[in-house]
Image (spheres, rainbow, N blue to C red):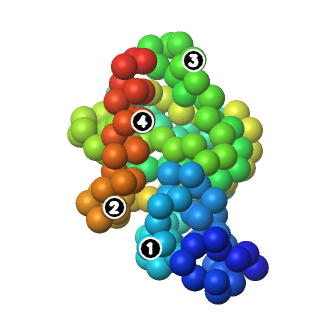
Amino acid sequence: MHRMGRESSEIVHDPTVVALGRVPLFSALSLKDLETLATVTSTRRLDVGTVLTTEGEVGEEFFVIERGVVTISAHDQQLRTLGPGDFLGEIAILFGGTRTATAVATEAGSLLVLPKPDFLELLAANPLIESKILDTAGERLRHL
């Protein structure tokens, strides 16, 4: 059980809602929005060595790291390391085309996974989240 610090004082039992509520990117969402988002979000185990994205391939999912560590590389150079609360996969989904980097798990954990259509619908309905993601995507593209 987890008490969400949002507009509702109810105790939340759904582990996906709790996990989404802990992601800074989704901090502006209401409990109802988080519950809606949870219906299209799956949880995926993250094993060391799992490849989440491959540079040059088409992207159909957006990932949020719940637990674990993911290393991002492009053009055979390590760019950054992501951990709990960080996200990836947005560039190919937002701008079309292919993945701009390869992402490999370097520490086991779990991911929250949103399919492309549901991710785009979330952004259309939540301009604040869209703005945060576009800012991050722009920054990541500058570093490529």
Q: Which mark is residue 78?
A: 3
The percent position of residue 93, horizontal first and vertical second, equals: 31, 45
The percent position of residue 141, horizontal first and vertical second, equals: 36, 24
Which amino acid lies under the numbered mark 1 shown in the image of this protein?
A: Asp
Q: Mark 2 falls on what kind of element?
A: loop
Q: Which residue is painted at 57% across and 73% down in the image? A: 6
Q: Mark 2 vs mark 3: which is more N-terminal?
A: 3
Q: Residue furthest bottom?
A: 10
Out of 142 and 108, give the one closest to the viewer: 142
Image quarter (top left, top right, bottom left or bottom right) of the N terminus: bottom right
Query: Vertical placement of 99 versus 41: above or below?
Result: above
C-alpha gap between disc 1 and disc 4: 22 Å
Which amino acid lies under the numbered mark 3 shown in the image of this protein?
A: Gln
Q: Mark 4 vs mark 3: which is more N-terminal?
A: 3
Q: Which mark is residue 126?
A: 2
Residue 94 at least partly seen: yes
Q: Give the left or right position of residue 114, taking residue 79 as reference.
A: left
Which amino acid lies under the numbered mark 2 shown in the image of this protein?
A: Asn
The percent position of residue 51, horizontal first and vertical second, equals: 56, 38
- Residue under pointer 4: 136
Image quarter (top left, top right, bottom left or bottom right) of the C terminus: top left
In which quadrant of the rendered view does residue 43 lie? bottom right
Query: Vertical placement of 134 versus 33: above or below?
Result: above
Q: Across the whole image, how many numbered discs are drawn on residues?
A: 4
In which quadrant of the rendered view does residue 12 lie? bottom right
How many other residues sit within 10 Å of disc 4, few (<14), some (14-19) or many (≥20)?
some
Q: Mark 2 vs mark 4: which is more N-terminal?
A: 2
Which amino acid lies under the numbered mark 4 shown in the image of this protein?
A: Thr
